[in-house]
Image (cartoon, rainbow, N blue to C red):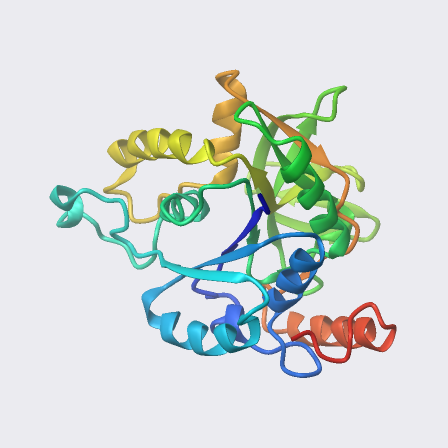
Amino acid sequence: MKPTLLILAAGMGSRYGGDKQIDGFGPNNETILEYSIYDAIQSGFGKVVFIVREEILDTAKALFLPKLNGLVEVDFVVQSITSHVDAALYKNLDRKKPFGTGHALLCAKDAIKEPFAVINADDFYGREAFTALGSFLVNDVSAELHCMVGYAIQNVLSDYGTVSRGVCTADEKGHLVGMIERTSISKIGDRILHQTATETVEIPLNTYVSMNCWGFHPSIFGETQRLWENFLTENYSNPKSEFYIPTIANQLIEENKAAIKILSGGVKWFGVTYSADKDIVTTALRQLHENAYYPEKLF
């Protein structure tokens, strides 16, 4: 059975200033996620599931369905503020956006029955990441073993502002021990610093971080449902609460329910956080086409 690619494309893009998931960056106006889809197909994936907001559903279908027709199975799932929220709690919700990446993962549970990868729509991950994911999801994944692709933190920063990253700790087997979400990370000179109002922490340049590039056995949906219900009970009235995939991963590790292998496929990465990042991404993609890393047209 071929694995599936789940693309998280429901983000609001507030710092970017628009819907970067469907903005054009390639020389033929390709979105970033089209490169991920191309690399995934080349790596043996057989299906793509998009998680989107209702407001961009029709636009996303019109943009991607004609390009992917006949190449891969495609499905769309809407993530809304009230997705998987009991009707009795609706009246107490005071939010402007859904609950985050873990919530998005849960929204896909009825669309995916096979091993699958999860990525952000606005990150370029590189073919090596999908090659590693495809091999793992076909040969190694189980209900007790999932994976993530690790990226060295020095390669995943923005030149135009601070970023948030899930900073990882691994054991001697290369399994994830834990992950701490660090905000306000920036490179200052030759140092990478996490700065808050009360402390400054230096992070070694080669430290693995999560770029939300995961590989899961479908059993993850049952665990996500369980953890979501606990989260919602405690946080539904907090308009800024977030239910993240790293939260799920950390909990499974703490409960000894599953291990998460850190794959070394994180070679190339660039992404769009701020509008000023667009020129860098556009230039990098053009160079990849010129160097024949990608064909003249992807689809």
Instruction: Look at the image and tell me in which quarter the N terminus lies.
Output: top right
For this view, does 60 lie left or right of residue 156?
A: left
Q: Residue at x 44, y 78 (%)?
A: 62
Q: Residue at x 45, y 72 (%)?
A: 60
Q: Residue at x 30, y 57 (%)?
A: 80
For this view, does 104 lie left or right of residue 27?
A: left
Res 10 visible = no
Residue 117 image position (x, y, % from top left): 57, 46
For this view, does 209 lie left or right of residue 17?
A: right
For this view, does 210 lie left or right of residue 94?
A: right
Res 218 visible = yes
Q: Residue at x 79, y 50 (%)?
A: 267
Residue 294 image position (x, y, % from top left): 78, 70
Q: Nearer the viewer, residue 252 or 244?
A: 252
Q: Nearer the viewer, residue 269 or 288?
A: 288
Direction bottom: furthest residue: 28
> On the image, which quarter does residue 36 sit in?
bottom right
Residue 32 lies, with reference to residue 228, above or below; the image says below
Residue 56 image position (x, y, % from top left): 39, 72
Residue 205 lies, with reference to residue 22, above or below; the image says above
Number of numbered callouts drawn: 0
> On the image, which quarter does residue 71 sit in?
bottom right
Residue 7 lies, with reference to residue 146, above or below; the image says below
Direction right: furthest residue: 291
Instruction: Look at the image and tell me in which quarter the C terminus lies.
Output: bottom right
Direction top: furthest residue: 256
Residue 235 image position (x, y, % from top left): 29, 37
